[in-house]
Image (cartoon, coloured by chain):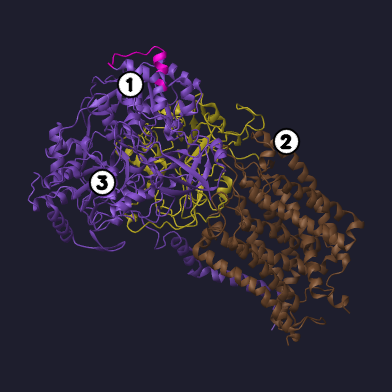
Chain colours: A yellow, B brown, C purple
Amino acid sequence: MSGHAVKEFKVTWGMVIDLDKCTGCGACMTACQVENNIAPMADASNKMRTLSWMLVFELSNKKAAPDAEIAYLPRPCMQCGNPACVPVCPVVATDKNEEGGIVSQIYPRCIGCRYCMAACPYHARYFNWEDPIFPKGMEKALSPNTSARPRGVVEKCNFCHTRFMKAKDKARQEGGNPEALADGAYMPACAEVCPTGAITFGDLKNPEHKVHELAKGENAFRLLEKLGLHPQVYYVSKREWVRKLGDNYAATGHAGAEKKHS
Amino acid sequence: MDRALFPDGVERCSFGKFALWMAFITAFFLFGLYAMIVIFAKGIVVTGLDNYFGFGLWITFDLAVIALGAGAFFTGFLKYILKIDQLKNIINLTVIVGFICYSGAMLVLTMDIGQPIRAWFGYWHPNVHSMLTEVIFCITCYCLVLVIEYVPLILEQKQLNSIPFLHYLAHNMHVNMALFAGIGAFLSTFHQGSLGGMYGVLQGRPYAFRDGFFIWPWTFFLFVLSAVGCGPIFTVLVCTFMEKLTGRKLVDYKTKALMGKIAGTMLTVYIFFKLLDTWAWAYDYLPSTGMTFDQMFYGVIYGKWLMFTEIILCGVVPAIMLITPSIRNNPTMLYTAGILDCIGICLNRYLFTVQTIAIPLLPFDIWQTYAPNWAEWATSGMIVAYGFLVMSLSYRYLPVFPQERAMNK
Amino acid sequence: MGLDRRGFVKFVVGGVAGTLFTPVIWKGLDDAAIWSQNWGWIPRVPKGEVKATPALSKLCPSGCAVKVKTVGGLPFAAIGNADNPMSKGGVCPICAGGAQLLYSPARVKSPMKKVGEGKFEAIKWEDAEAMLVEKLTSFKGQDGKIAAISGDETGTANEVVSALLSGLGNASGFCVMPGEMYTATKGVKLMGGNGQPGFDIAGADLVLMIGADALDSWGPSVANQKAFAASHPTGAAATAQFIYAGPVLNNTSSVCDKFLAVPPTATAAFSLALANALINAGAVCSASDFGDYKALAAKYTPEAFEKATGLKAEALKDLVARIKAAKAPLVIAGASFGQGAGALDFVAGASLNVLLGRVGQSGGMTLLPAAPKALAAATDRAEAKDAGSFLAQVATGKASPAVLLVYEANPAFALPQADAMAKALGNIAFKVSFSTYMDETATLADLILPAPHPYERFDDAMNPYGVAKPTYLAGKPAMAKPVMDVKDPVDVLLAAGSKLGLSLGFETYADVIKAKAQAVGADFDTLASGGAWTGEGKGGGLSLGAAALAKAPVAKADDKAVALAPVTKLACGTADLATPPANLLTIRDTELKGKDLFVQMNAATAKKLGVTDGNKVKLTGGSGEVRARVHVNEGVAADTVAMLLGFGHSAWDQYTKGKGDNVYKILTVSDEAGTGLKVWAGSTVTVAKI
């Protein structure tokens, strides 16, 4: 069994996240929660039960004080080119089939078997442990962009897909080309809110979009690239220790190109 | 008082004793039932499963009982297709064990999925690329086959069988049993394999991911082999356990030893390939992902001892014991080998389920640990209790063991 | 009766087929799919036109210029306002979840009066206002009987509150919650200058932040972050260096080019050692007290630097080299948690700007002139009393107010030695809380007059601390009517004033803000539609503050105690806002786990204290103690323990109540030598395993 082929699209939405600019402030997580109607949790410190479609990891260079350094790594869904989660779903509740290359999640279809969670090495998929019960009145502040999911289904980041649809609608109304949106015409909530602009979002295949070049930068990398899942989310950092934490190099001890599994 | 319902010519314990035994088992069953109701009412948030461990005790339990229940299809295959007639002495038991294992597993699965009301989506919106779809199809179909195999046995109950309609129904089903055994063997091979395939296709999980043949990763074949390497001997262990419990002889040792030989042969084939597979995984695949063998293990809870126990102590050792006639023909040694064999296969299923997802792949992530909580144990216990209840009733009222009458004269 | 083989097959096939032809199964299954998605208790998403309305979101201390996204007129999200120079499209984490705060379970829904210990009864606004007027009437003209505490640093509401107090004969009763604006302005005075200091981060090519958490919780954090972002283009070389010297490897320092771990007790020593090193490397300036300054700084040798900070002298050398190489270096001095530092810590840091000739320069330190007032009778911003000193006087009986008005502040929680402060509040007979949320102070109040959420009100922000140029923002309501039965506190006070026969010249806060805009020279409508007014910052002949610095105390060494570094993370909340519901996820499980707050320290400190990761400990300091669990974190300075502020609430909502402990309780207040200011940034604590 040699995995599945990478699915190619004319438009490939992706992110380039500059880890040297992310302060870990959490605005992206908040904006994501607001946009996607995730109910507040009584004990959000139990990270084994939270729903964080966007999660900011803390990376450490593991050096003792005063040489310690940290970096923050926002982790949305990687929207893999060769997703581990899609082929395993028994009921086609997740798919990568639409122009743009976003891995969908169809909540009314999902049976909650969590096989996709077991498949995803990025922990980007979350099981909805409890019904989305908002404190009284707060349901009036629900975003119109994402339906609330019942408990028992798996959910994840979809690059704020409704915004994609709206951007395409807008382009159509304005006589533009919905298949070639301008840079910035479509922007997920996290990228939009980020106060340091650490998240650049756009079409990786479109030379007019900033991400096109940024993803090819010498300091750009993807998480766990050797697993061959071809994430559409890129990271950049000038710090070597940060780049080294993007993948596993234990077998050789050094970073760099090696046999990549596909 | 219920003597009239017993199979012809056999002795059973007093009804009072039987009732006491059933009450004892029912207590466990009811506790599990309570847990199940809580789970359906509140969702699986009440279990020990979490964001990192979407699979846990339940999936391990399912995979283990399905492997242990493999005695049904494989024995059926040998008896009805390859016509090894001696197996008729134990075939009924394999069917009941298989039925219990599969129906129990399906019940656990309905709890395990977050949306039990949508359990049927697997048929309605199948993803043909998913190994799990295949599992859903084959397990449910095979469970039906097991029902079809089990029903004639029920109909052979003395009173029921005296009703002409049921008698003919049972007879007709018996006549067609080779067909069902064939279907069963086909379905079962596939879903045993698909269960392994489920893990083997996890390209993002280096502990489980394997190359393979066509669309089937090597784990597909390893799971089939390991299931048939333990299922038959598990039936022997169940039978022997029943003999110890009831104090009656149920199946002759010759048949048991034959089952041991069958399991041992398959286990040997399995463990040979398992060793090859593990070697290739550790020396070829893992380095290609940048990881090392050592990185797959952590502390005691996820230590290397698990893998060595699985493959050597509970794999190579029982395989040798079972294929060596002199060892196999010693009952104590046969049962010891059988127990080791079954533990090894269960451990294999556990490791593929839990170790696979416990390993932190993101280099900045940390190991998390999983421990099932009361709700998972209670419901798993409920399935075991359910098995005891079905088996107790079957033993008391149905002609399960053709040799019993003669052996206890 | 017999059943042959054919009959058997017919029976089975017919049975199955027959069932399938009934609608029961199909209808049932189909409905099940619908039910399982749309249970009655699953909220439906709202429908309606989506709009984005500019607003001034004063949820964070400096206020974010946001656009509130509404659906059918109801807010659901906030995005940055790209056209506003303070936002440039960015939003802080608190303001990003502003819409959800409208419906916070902690919101005060209507006016309430106290009817027993911790018991309140909803009352009508007219009764509530009558109660307020009655109390004010009875103490009108009796100096010292009426006081107010404001937690708003930037609003013109302060002018109304203080003018009202003046009119009631209690001009000196106006107090403010601690913030750096006050100590820094006092520091500027000690340097012979006048005005609020500003920092032109956008124009600098080296920004040395001493304590100031400028990229997360200090100053106009979004504007600062935007300036940082502009100098650090993704995929290209950075055009400015950012260096952080402070006690904790925090959000700001995580992206800095260099982090220097300086214990909170050594802030001034760090600055002066840097001054000494710079002077030794040739820095001179024309300030009149340069000689004294040089002599003073000379005491802070590299050896003294090593002793005070625990850092190597090479770090200082490297820093000097970086500063020397920079064209436009800027030093920002501030407490790492935005308060409690004395004026001298500020002077020590700011003097570096003078030394480097960076005052009044592009990319340097500026001075903001006092803004024109809308109400002439109002107290000058810099003249306000600090609430901590005031309550300390109340505790000892030196002050005995009968009526206290609390505006947008939570002194019962967010003052050092919080327990003592809450107790002092008990000495005041009648307390009125103008609060949006049921905070600790509101639960102690006799009358709660609910204030609107920022989206429901007019408000403004004059010169948020840290801005380089005079800056004025104003906003109007972003929704048609408030969610709760609230009234603007300023409107209430203006009405009360007129009933008391004090005409302050305005009837509503909106009018006050319009007058303020006019006084400043800004157009209110432009501001209310998301614009900003900016003036020019100026320089000014500042001295090096040598005279004041000569009084700076040498940190006392205490073997048993370690320095306490309270940490502010904007997402965790502010002094008057507990962690909002939409920010809960951002708290790490190494900061708070269940109900346990973590105390962070490096491995060496942990070893010294005899504790290990996960241990439960008790920290004692000031007049209180807090409990926490140890988390070993190599990002904490030597002999220092760090803890997040903003936890351990006893009021608020189910998300925050009883979570963690309140670090304010263990801050030790002391008098700063020479300035008489209360300081607590260099607090020490003892740590004991429990």
Whole-number angstrom distance, CA of label 2 to CA of label 3: 62 Å
Q: Residue at x 34, y 35 (%)?
A: C90
Q: Residue at x 12, y 40 (%)?
A: C377
Give SS at disc 3.
Answer: helix
Q: Is residue C209 left or right of residue C377?
A: right
Mark toward the viewer: 1 or 2: 1
Point out the image quarter for the N terminus of chain C. bottom right
Residues marked 1 and 2 touching at CB (< 8 Å): no
Whole-number angstrom distance, CA of label 1 to CA of label 2: 61 Å
Q: Which residue, given by chain and number where applicable, does mark 3 sit on?
A: C454
Residue interval drawn in magenta: C273-288
Q: Position of residue B263 (x, y in %)?
A: 81, 57
Kindly identify which chain the residue marked by label 1 belongs to: C
Q: Is residue B3 above or below residue C484?
A: below
Kindly identify which chain the residue marked by label 2 belongs to: B
The type of residue carrying mark 3 is: Pro
Q: Which residue, given by chain and number where applicable, does mark 2 sit on?
A: B283
Q: Position of residue B72 (x, y in %)?
A: 74, 63
Question: In terms of depth relative to the viewer, which is nearer, C468 or C166?
Answer: C166
